[in-house]
Image (cartoon, rainbow, N blue to C red):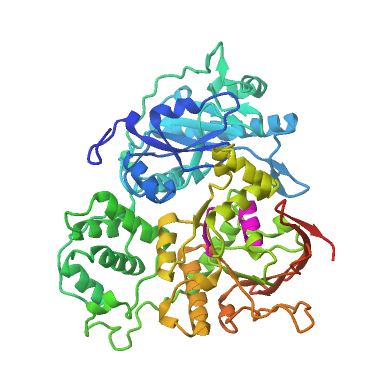
Amino acid sequence: MVSSNEEPKLDELYYEIAKNNAHNRNIVVARSELGDYIGEGKVVYRSMYGYKNTLKDHMTIAKSVQSFKDTCYIENLVFDLDSHYEDKENKKDTEVFDDPVKLKKVLTDAVYGVKELIRLIAEMTGTPEYSIPIWYSGRGFHLQTPDFFHFKPSTYLREEVEATMKHFFPMIDHLPYMTSGLIRLNYSYNAKSKTYKIPVHYQDLTHIDDILIRAKSYMEDGKLIKVKYDEWDAYDLSDKIIVAQEKARFEVNKHNTTRIVTCVQNMFNAGSIKGQSHNMLLRMLTVWRKQGMTYGQSLILAKAWVDKGWSDYEVTNQVNSVWKNRYLPYGCQDNLMAKYCDQDCIYYKNRNYNIAIDDNVTILQKLAQRIKDDNDPENPSFDLKNVFDLPVEIKFRKGQAILLFGHPKIGKSFWMQYVCQKAKIKTLYYTLEMPVEEIIQRQVSIQLEEDIFKVEQRVLQGEDIYEMSELIKHITFIGISPTLSDIRAHIENYEPEWVIIDTVGYISEDQFKGNETLKLNYIFEELKKMAITYKVVILVIQHIVNGVDEKGKLKPLNMFSGLYSKTGSRAFDKILGWEGYQDQPRRKLSMLANREGVYFTKYMMFDKVKSTLTPTTE
């Protein structure tokens, strides 16, 4: 195994792969093992970049390759030219895998773009056109060449490669070169077109029918399909690389302080202090990020500041965490920041550092990004409409806090478990009223749509334990009452997309003992801040004040029905009501409050034994 200080050989690199579809990712394999994922009907994607073995350490903590910020490597350049069929009637591009005639047409049309790109690469590199490897990808074509830019391994490689490819080759798909980008593995199966990714020769481009026939398999005569190309002999274009900002280096010394956030400058000059260095670095990083430093510049400063007790991985991981989660800076009221406070600072008088003010352009850019994220076909925002056949879209968006309350003992926790299991989104689940074991049993029952007692028998017999575990692998359960600080730490550690709290009354905040109203108001406001800061969806279950009147009839719910939360509930973006009688299966789900102004009412039948919710009429 290569040490973290040595440059690995190609076979010592690691790649991220995704199996079956692009969502089933964050699987790390050695380069030498990629061939094991070639086979009959195997759909596999790989990362464009290779990584050092420190990626395996990273994955034990972060669970996500995307957040890895150590040195990256690139072996080959892949030029992705997918094909689409223009549906003039619907005015949109439509994939046409089920129609052989249309598929042949779009591939034939795509060949013109492929030949133009080959000519461009040949002119740039001085290599013959017949020496440029071509792959039929299952829906278009990939060109796969040696790295004629000669990119050097670095922490900023992905930024350099993406910028360079966008500059010189604007016509290709650039998504594979992004931090989270994937490309179809050579010889992988395309389930939509029912063909394999195979190599083809330049001369084959005029015979699409032949390509489609050959692509029904990835082998010929019992061996992987191979194509012989002319010898590759290209110019060195390393001087054409679009240089990343992070390559800038600057001297790191103790300097006289300025009047801008002077406390952080004093903190830096004080040096790493045993027992406080992690907290000190966290505060400096959040301020550096807000003041406009790049990731690479902050990493250089951080490595210069820490003492010898830190490993490179620890420093990189902390810098990465701040950038990935976009932590807001600590303010003047923070105890550690206050320790280094300086009367020369422009914020000294009002103690008002960290009031974020964006200009209108920045706000509109953020809105555009939110809309793109919301409608990303690869990873769209969750829509409750798709679970319960609602008449309107009810999307759970990053940064939102969502509250559910309802009448007692009618399955509030079950509703949340049901939605969580149907969504299949990476979730941190605080189960504070029910044992974790019961929650897991219910989750498996929901997924299998199987009698909960049958699931119990499966577990007792030790049957399918590992298969059942796979059904709930997207959820991390915590059964101990947390503080707000615990929740922040867990979000940073587990990097979930959703956080579920069942129920909010069990969050520990001793400073408000004896005043539940103030406690809940504070907790609600802090949870909303967490949702925004960490870009997660936080879903909260809360009990209500009193669900029935003197005659035993259910009281209608409204946004203020929550226990001790007459004002705190205003912190939530959406408030859902769950109504019904304990001895009856009929339930009513309704939107009680929604910042987006969209409301609905939906009735359904709750079968607790079979763990189902079936929409019904009023």
Q: Is residue 566 above or below residue 35?
A: below
Q: Is residue 615 magenta?
A: no
* Left or right of 32 in this view: 112: right
Indicate left or right for 212 with 490 as reference: right
Of residue 192 and residue 605, the one placed in the foreground of this image is 605
Residue name at image x 28 percent, y 49 percent: 313
Give the residue at x 28% y 53%: 314
Question: What's drawn in magenta, residue-wise?
Answer: 415-432
Residue 422 sits inside the magenta stretch: yes
Residue furthest bottom in the image = 349
Q: Looking at the image, which is closer to me, 98 or 243?
A: 98
Q: Position of residue 496 (x, y in %)?
A: 49, 56
| Residue at (52% x, 75% y) in the render | 524
Compared to 140, does 390 lie above or below? below
Measured as percent of width and height from the top left, residue 531 is found at: 50, 67
- Residue 602 visible (yes or no): yes
